């Protein structure tokens, strides 16, 4: 006997994400989900972003890390409230932040007193793309020390994101990296996606990135 | 990489889809639809599901995975086509303004219970 089910496997997560989105909208907090492969510079980009936004834009960060508090410690120096989630303690080293984790973390934040909440997801270009957390926008960070063909290998991530950052451009003179190829690969997967070429180390390119971010807060 | 979590969700949905009046039900087959864009490796999902299904009414169930192609539609010229490689512009008019109609599915279509 066949029983029709027709249910999305990620129903539970999607429902939770919708609740988060509603709560964030009520509290007028814009939520940005930042994703990348390990080490492309999410934390470094955020450190500089926070230093340029705070205190004008009241920002908090939720950071997922498999098992250290290093990123949280670095980000807390900005004065922004930082909530750290060790996914290693949950179901055996989770590869992404799920919506219920964000709900828990957000309950420890004074949302009414925030303009912007940035989530640094777990370093991974596959799984986080599949999990809605109730964010308003998604950014993928790529660095010039990775292959130019990353967008072609992980198309879902580049499709679901609204913007891309190509980070560590201060290293370009020392590498054979073809940044034009990288940009054209991103656009092949997601035509018209805004792309910001940054150096979290020198601050190069941050004006354009911050302008985009601030524009989102006004929408 | 998150196939274990996905397998747990599948098990949860299957469990709740077995009619409560069917005691001793044995699930023979679980029909899943997985989009080609979904971040799922079918072989890992099968392996994880086998582990989770031990000692349940679906321990012998076959996980039947139907792969759903990625179909896109152009917002500018309404052209519809199947995307094979990682290229997401309209194949008719080159527009980049497209919608993905299918290919992200990750859903349980039905379960089959032994008579
Ligand atoms: N030269 C250079 N190095 C950078 C830049 N941004 C980050 N790095 C370095 O790259 C390494 C990884 O940076 P993180 O900011 O920790 O990267 P992440 O993406 O947060 O890493 P995970 O959270 O572990 O996934 C560190 O050694 C940084 O100092 C940059 O713009 N230029
Ligand atoms: Mg980090
Ligand atoms: Zn077209």
Image (cartoon, rainbow, N blue to C red):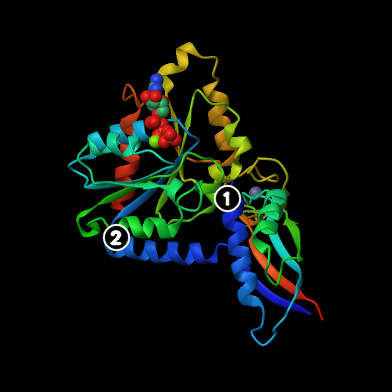
In this rendering, the answer to whether B39 lies above or below A124 is: below
In this rendering, the answer to whether B65 lies above or below B19 is: above
Q: Residues within 10 Å of mark 1 (few under 14, many from 20)?
A: many
Residue A59: percent from left, percent from top: 25, 46
Q: Which mark is residue A219?
A: none
Task: Quickly name the residue at label 1.
Answer: B2
Q: Is residue A29 left or right of residue B19?
A: left
Quadrant of ligand 1: it is: top left
Q: Quadrant of the C terminus of chain A?
A: bottom left
Residue A45: quarter of image: top left
Residue at 73% across, 44% down: B84
Residue at 32% across, 21% down: A202
Residue B2: percent from left, percent from top: 57, 50
Question: Relative to the observer, which residue lies in front, A217 or B51?
Answer: B51
Residue at 61% across, 30% down: A149
Q: Which mark is residue A107?
A: 2
Under tag 2, what secondary structure? loop
Question: Relative to the observer, which residue lies in front, B69 or A190?
Answer: B69
Q: Quadrant of the N terminus of chain A?
A: bottom right
In the rendered image, is residue B2 in sight?
yes
Question: Relative to the observer, which residue lies in front, B106 or A206?
Answer: B106
In this rendering, the answer to whether A145 lies above or below A33 is: above
Residue A139: percent from left, percent from top: 44, 42
Q: Is residue A204 left or right of residue A93?
A: left
Distance between the alpha carbons at the discs numbered 1 and 2: 25 Å
Residue A154: quarter of image: top right
Q: Is residue A6 left or right of residue A92?
A: right
Q: Is mark 1 within 8 Å of ligand 1?
A: no
Discs 1, 2: same chain:
no
Q: Residues within 10 Å of mark 2 (few under 14, many from 20)?
A: few
């Amino acid at each position: 006997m066949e029983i029709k089910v027709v249910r999305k496997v990620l129903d539970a997560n999607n429902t939770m994400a919708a609740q988060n989105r509603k709560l964030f909208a009520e509290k007028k907090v814009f939520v940005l989900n930042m994703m990348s492969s390990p080490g492309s510079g999410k934390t470094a980009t955020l450190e500089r972003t926070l230093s340029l936004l705070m205190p004008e834009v009241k920002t908090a960060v939720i950071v997922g890390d498999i098992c250290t508090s290093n990123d949280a410690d670095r980000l807390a120096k900005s004065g922004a409230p930082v909530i750290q989630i060790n996914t290693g303690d949950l179901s055996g080293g989770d590869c992404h932040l799920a919506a219920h984790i964000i709900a828990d973390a957000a309950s420890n934040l004074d949302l009414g007193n925030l303009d912007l909440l940035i989530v640094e997801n777990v370093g991974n270009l596959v799984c986080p793309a599949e999990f809605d957390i109730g964010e308003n926008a998604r950014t993928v960070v790529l660095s010039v020390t990775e292959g130019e063909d990353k967008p072609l290998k992980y198309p879902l991530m580049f499709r679901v994101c609204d913007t891309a950052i190509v980070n560590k451009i201060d290293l370009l003179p020392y590498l054979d990296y073809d940044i034009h190829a990288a940009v054209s690969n991103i656009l092949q997967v997601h035509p018209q996606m805004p792309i910001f070429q940054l150096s979290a180390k020198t601050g190069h390119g941050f004006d354009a990135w911050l302008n985009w971010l601030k524009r989102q807060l006004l929408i | 990489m998150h196939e274990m979590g996905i397998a747990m969700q599948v098990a949860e949905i299957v469990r709740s889809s077995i009619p409560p009046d069917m005691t001793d039900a044995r699930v023979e087959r679980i029909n899943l639809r997985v989009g080609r864009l979904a971040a799922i490796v079918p072989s890992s999902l099968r392996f994880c599901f086998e582990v989770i299904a031990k000692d349940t009414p679906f321990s012998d169930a076959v996980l039947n995975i139907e792969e759903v192609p990625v179909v896109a539609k152009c917002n500018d010229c309404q052209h519809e086509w199947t995307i094979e490689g990682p290229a997401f512009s309209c194949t008719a008019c080159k527009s980049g303004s497209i919608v993905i109609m299918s290919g992200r599915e990750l859903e349980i279509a039905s379960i089959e219970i032994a008579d």
